[in-house]
Amino acid sequence: MIHPKQIAFIRRHLRERGLHNRELLEEMTDHYLTEIEDEMEKGHSFEAALSICLDLHQGWDMKKLNRSIFFIHHKSKIFMASMSVICMAFFAYFQLATPVEAPVELPQITELHELSLEIQMVSFEPPNTWPIKTREKEITSAFGMRMHPEKKVKQHHMGIDIRADEGTPVYAPETGTVLTAKYDGKKGNYIQIQHDETYTTRYYHLKSFDVKAGDKIEKGDKIGEVGSTGYSFGPHLHYEVRKNGKAVDPEDYLGLQ
Amino acid sequence: MKSSKDFLSGTLRTIILALLKEHGKMYGYEICQLTAKLTHEEILLTEGAIYPALHKMEKQGLLVSSKVKVNGRTRKYYELNQESLPEVAQEIRLLLDFSQHLKNLLKPAL
């Protein structure tokens, strides 16, 4: 029976020889170990069997093997990538050349216009301004795994806590529609805003609301005031950004300003 | 001079397919071992040859793979995709015919 440490040793050995494809690494680890087991059955110790096996495979260029496997799995992707580069080059040329040669009414232009509109839609800005305008912004608890300050257990923190005095205005970081503005035992008075198909933001522990569910809001509109309602120990704003419903680190977006 | 390794390149795929057709589920090392045994160590398949061939055929849909935990590690088994069976049988037949023609061509010269 082979020890897990010996398995780990083989895996490391292969990786050091340039084998990085995870699937192939598992396959080769099994290949080597089965061979070692066969040698051990002949009466060799693990060490002796290992050296027989390594000698046997010495000449093999793992980097080359890794490359050929990579190419097999990604050939279509590489092909698609190069095709899309060619297409983009074609479009760029087309876009530059058409206005000179043809009147604006041509259907191609409309298509291009639609395409550029589509690109604009896709590149809609995520909420990337601070919901609080105080000069000093202190994040008292960051996004991610943390020791809960009160419960003293490890938890995933879905947003950031920003220190602010009670009554500090909270502003919408981006245009959107208010989905929720109500009280919850844990979240306190909280607001949820839908910005586009992808992004929503949440604001917890508010003292008061300036909006109600269904309201259309502009970037920079005041939506409420910082408080300490719900499961909170002192005034602060818990701010969350969700991308397709999944919490992401708001600081990644705040850095985009 | 050319060695058996040089003759292998065009036939490796068919050899693997034939072994899998005959023996069902097999993993990489097993295919190498069985080939060595059946050819009295004349044809030795190396990992550099066999794994790219297996991965390629899996990608093409000729083979399907499954994974099994064995002694603390994962073993990847390959088997023929049942849908490609007629195609595989035809390929084996073609190579067998080809080797017969080779024999007819080469034998008189020895």
Image (cartoon, rainbow, N blue to C red):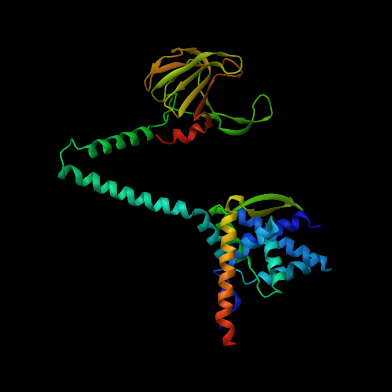
Q: Position of residue B91 (x, y in %)?
A: 56, 62
A99 displayed left or right of A83: left
- Residue furthest to the right: A43
Front position in the image: A3 or A164: A3
Q: Position of residue A252 (x, y in %)?
A: 48, 36
Q: Quadrant of the C terminus of chain B?
A: bottom right
Front position in the image: B110 or A50: B110
A109 displayed left or right of A144: left
Q: Residue at x 16, y 42 (%)?
A: A102
Q: Position of residue A141 (x, y in %)?
A: 57, 30
Can residue B52 be seen here?
no
Q: Quadrant of the N terminus of chain B?
A: bottom right
A188 displayed left or right of A96: right
Q: Residue at x 82, y 68 (%)?
A: A42
Does A126 sit above or below residue A219? below
Q: Position of residue B102 (x, y in %)?
A: 56, 77
Numbered circles on residues, count: 0
Can residue A72 be seen here?
yes
Does A231 sit above or below residue A252? above
| Quadrant in the picture for residue B101 | bottom right
Does A116 sit above or below residue A12? above
Q: Residue at x 31, y 37 (%)?
A: A115
Does A104 sit above or below residue A80? above
Front position in the image: A41 or A132: A41
Front position in the image: A192 or B6: B6
Q: Residue at x 75, y 56 (%)?
A: A5
| Quadrant in the picture for residue A55 | bottom right
